[in-house]
Image: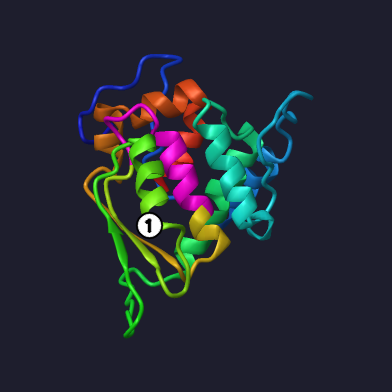
Amino acid sequence: ASSGAPAAPAGAWMPRLTPWGAEDLVKERQRALTFDEPAADYAGPRYTKGSDITDAWLQKLMDFQKTGGLLPKKDAYLVVLDIIAQLKSEGAMGELEVKAGESLTVFGDLHGQYFDVLNILGLSGMPSTKTPFLFNGDFVDRGSWSIEVILLLYCMKLKDPKTVFFNRGNHEMLEANLIYGFAGETGLKYDLDLFNLFSE
């Protein structure tokens, strides 16, 4: 109000503009745990913690996502909450050493192009200690499969945090996500409260 910005209309959604504190994140996890379980015919993988993720789990997720399947809302929230904790535990500027006989696969500007990601993974294989992956920003927006892309990347990171690395791009920011589609896609596929968590 002191900046002279107009107030939001009553009932309108506004993005969260303040950081999430530790207590906020605990409350959000408690809220997520109350979400409904998926329907009995749900055929995708389930997530409760990072140790759930194996190579077979990731393959099941990719097979499920490419047919239009989404992780249950509860699971998506828990993935995002766990990646927030993981990323907060890492330094803002990471260092990665690639030794002789190893290789680093660098991805850039995925922009929600899920089938391009699957194609690249088909060529490169999955990340490992000898072949780590660096995702060089712009994971979401523009493409209509941004949720699938970012949740897959987060799950790969949660499986083995020392084999998957992220650099932030200009589309890992609130304003770009509001303009170029990720906020709307998140609201359509899940809800805008999850978008607020992604923004954290």
* Residue 45, horizontal then vertical, whole percent: 67, 41
What secondary structure is marked by label 1? helix
Residue 69, relative to residue 110: is it above or below?
above
User: Looking at this view, is 85 or 144 the one in front?
Assistant: 144
Which quadrant does the N terminus fall into?
A: top left
Verify whether residue 144 appears in magenta: yes
* Residue 108, horizontal then vertical, whole percent: 25, 51
* Residue 53, horizontal then vertical, whole percent: 63, 55
User: Looking at this view, is 191 or 151 the one in front?
Assistant: 151
> What residue appears at the point 41 percent right and 17 percent down from the top-left corner?
12
Q: Which residue in the protein does label 1 denote?
A: 124
> What residue appears at the point 61 percent right and 42 percent down from the top-left corner?
60
* Residue 168, horizontal then vertical, whole percent: 29, 55
Q: Residues within 10 Å of mark 1 (few under 14, many from 20)?
A: few
Furthest residue toward bottom: 100
Verify whether residue 146 appears in magenta: yes
Q: How is the image coloured?
A: rainbow
Question: Which span of residues is magenta-colored?
Answer: 140-155
Q: Is residue 21 visible?
A: no
User: Looking at this view, is 134 or 184 the one in front?
Assistant: 134
> What residue appears at the point 38 percent right and 72 percent down from the top-left corner?
91
Residue 104, relative to residue 3: is it above or below?
below
Q: Is residue 139 visible?
A: yes
Number of callouts: 1
The amino acid sitting under disc 1 is: Ser
